[in-house]
Image (spheres, rainbow, N blue to C red):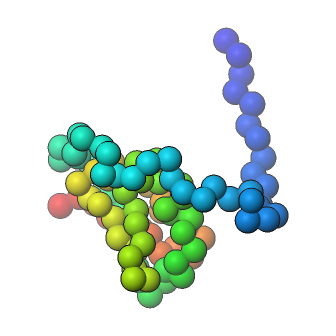
Amino acid sequence: MKQVKLIEYEEPKTWADIPWATCSEAGILITKNAGWRNERPVIDPKKCIGCGQCYLYCPDGVISFAEGEVSIDYDFCKGCGICSGICRRGAIRMEEER
Protein backbone atom coordinates (compact mmCIF):
# COMPACT_ATOMS: atom_id res chain seq x y z
CA MET A 1 0.00 0.00 0.00
CA LYS A 2 1.31 3.44 -0.92
CA GLN A 3 1.96 5.87 1.86
CA VAL A 4 0.08 9.16 1.84
CA LYS A 5 2.34 12.13 1.19
CA LEU A 6 1.50 15.13 3.34
CA ILE A 7 1.97 18.54 1.78
CA GLU A 8 3.04 21.32 4.09
CA TYR A 9 0.56 24.19 4.34
CA GLU A 10 1.66 27.46 2.77
CA GLU A 11 0.03 30.81 3.49
CA PRO A 12 -1.67 32.28 0.40
CA LYS A 13 0.57 34.94 -1.13
CA THR A 14 -2.00 36.53 -3.44
CA TRP A 15 -5.78 36.53 -3.80
CA ALA A 16 -5.37 34.10 -6.72
CA ASP A 17 -4.15 31.46 -4.25
CA ILE A 18 -7.49 31.49 -2.40
CA PRO A 19 -10.52 29.64 -3.82
CA TRP A 20 -13.27 32.12 -4.71
CA ALA A 21 -16.17 29.89 -3.65
CA THR A 22 -17.18 26.51 -2.34
CA CYS A 23 -17.85 23.87 -4.97
CA SER A 24 -21.60 23.98 -4.39
CA GLU A 25 -24.24 25.63 -2.28
CA ALA A 26 -26.26 23.68 0.28
CA GLY A 27 -29.41 24.18 -1.78
CA ILE A 28 -28.46 21.38 -4.18
CA LEU A 29 -28.19 18.84 -1.38
CA ILE A 30 -31.17 16.53 -1.06
CA THR A 31 -30.36 14.53 2.06
CA LYS A 32 -30.92 16.44 5.27
CA ASN A 33 -29.10 15.68 8.49
CA ALA A 34 -31.31 12.98 9.96
CA GLY A 35 -30.40 13.64 13.59
CA TRP A 36 -27.18 11.63 13.64
CA ARG A 37 -24.92 14.65 14.17
CA ASN A 38 -23.22 14.61 17.62
CA GLU A 39 -21.93 18.18 17.60
CA ARG A 40 -22.86 21.33 15.74
CA PRO A 41 -20.86 24.49 15.07
CA VAL A 42 -21.90 27.66 16.87
CA ILE A 43 -20.58 31.04 15.73
CA ASP A 44 -19.69 33.77 18.23
CA PRO A 45 -20.50 37.00 16.32
CA LYS A 46 -18.30 39.03 18.68
CA LYS A 47 -15.20 37.07 17.63
CA CYS A 48 -16.05 36.59 13.94
CA ILE A 49 -14.29 39.06 11.61
CA GLY A 50 -15.99 37.81 8.43
CA CYS A 51 -12.80 36.47 6.81
CA GLY A 52 -14.74 33.72 5.01
CA GLN A 53 -12.35 30.85 5.73
CA CYS A 54 -15.14 28.75 7.25
CA TYR A 55 -17.23 29.35 4.12
CA LEU A 56 -14.39 28.31 1.84
CA TYR A 57 -13.48 25.15 3.73
CA CYS A 58 -16.97 23.82 4.53
CA PRO A 59 -17.24 20.57 2.51
CA ASP A 60 -21.05 20.77 2.38
CA GLY A 61 -21.36 24.49 1.57
CA VAL A 62 -23.71 25.14 4.49
CA ILE A 63 -22.09 28.39 5.68
CA SER A 64 -23.27 31.65 4.13
CA PHE A 65 -22.82 35.40 4.59
CA ALA A 66 -25.75 37.81 4.43
CA GLU A 67 -25.75 41.45 5.50
CA GLY A 68 -22.46 41.04 7.36
CA GLU A 69 -23.60 38.01 9.36
CA VAL A 70 -22.54 34.40 9.07
CA SER A 71 -25.18 31.70 9.18
CA ILE A 72 -25.15 27.90 9.09
CA ASP A 73 -27.81 25.75 7.44
CA TYR A 74 -28.17 23.13 10.18
CA ASP A 75 -30.50 21.04 8.00
CA PHE A 76 -27.48 20.00 5.94
CA CYS A 77 -24.55 20.50 8.37
CA LYS A 78 -22.88 17.17 9.18
CA GLY A 79 -21.01 18.49 12.24
CA CYS A 80 -17.56 17.61 10.88
CA GLY A 81 -15.87 20.53 12.71
CA ILE A 82 -13.70 21.66 9.79
CA CYS A 83 -15.05 25.21 10.14
CA SER A 84 -14.15 25.25 13.83
CA GLY A 85 -10.66 23.95 13.14
CA ILE A 86 -9.91 26.47 10.39
CA CYS A 87 -11.14 29.55 12.32
CA ARG A 88 -8.05 31.38 13.59
CA ARG A 89 -10.11 33.73 15.77
CA GLY A 90 -11.80 30.90 17.66
CA ALA A 91 -15.19 32.28 16.63
CA ILE A 92 -16.64 28.83 15.92
CA ARG A 93 -16.96 26.25 18.65
CA MET A 94 -18.44 22.79 18.44
CA GLU A 95 -21.36 22.33 20.81
CA GLU A 96 -22.98 19.04 21.77
CA GLU A 97 -26.17 18.45 19.81
CA ARG A 98 -29.36 18.85 21.85
Residue drawn at the location 18% of the way across and 43% of the way down: 34
60 relative position to 6: left or right: left
Quadrant of image for the N terminus: top right
Q: Quadrant of residue 28?
A: top left
State the image coordinates of residue 65 (x, y, percent, origin top left).
42, 72
The reply to whether residue 89 is in sight is: yes
Residue drawn at the location 63% of the way across and 55% of the way down: 19
Residue drawn at the location 73% of the way across and 65% of the way down: 15
Q: How many marks?
A: 0
Q: Give the vertical position of 85 relative to 33 (above or below).
A: below
61 relative position to 14: left or right: left
The reply to whether residue 36 is in sight is: no
Q: Residue furthest right?
A: 13
Quadrant of image for the C terminus: bottom left
Q: Give the vertical position of 57 relative to 15 (above or below).
A: above
Residue drawn at the location 22% of the way across and 45% of the way down: 32
Q: Residue furthest top?
A: 1
Q: Quadrant of residue 11?
A: bottom right
State the image coordinates of residue 85 (x, y, percent, origin top left).
53, 59
Instruction: Give the camera-side residue of 26 and 4.
Output: 26
59 relative position to 98: left or right: right
State the image coordinates of residue 87 (x, y, percent, origin top left).
55, 67
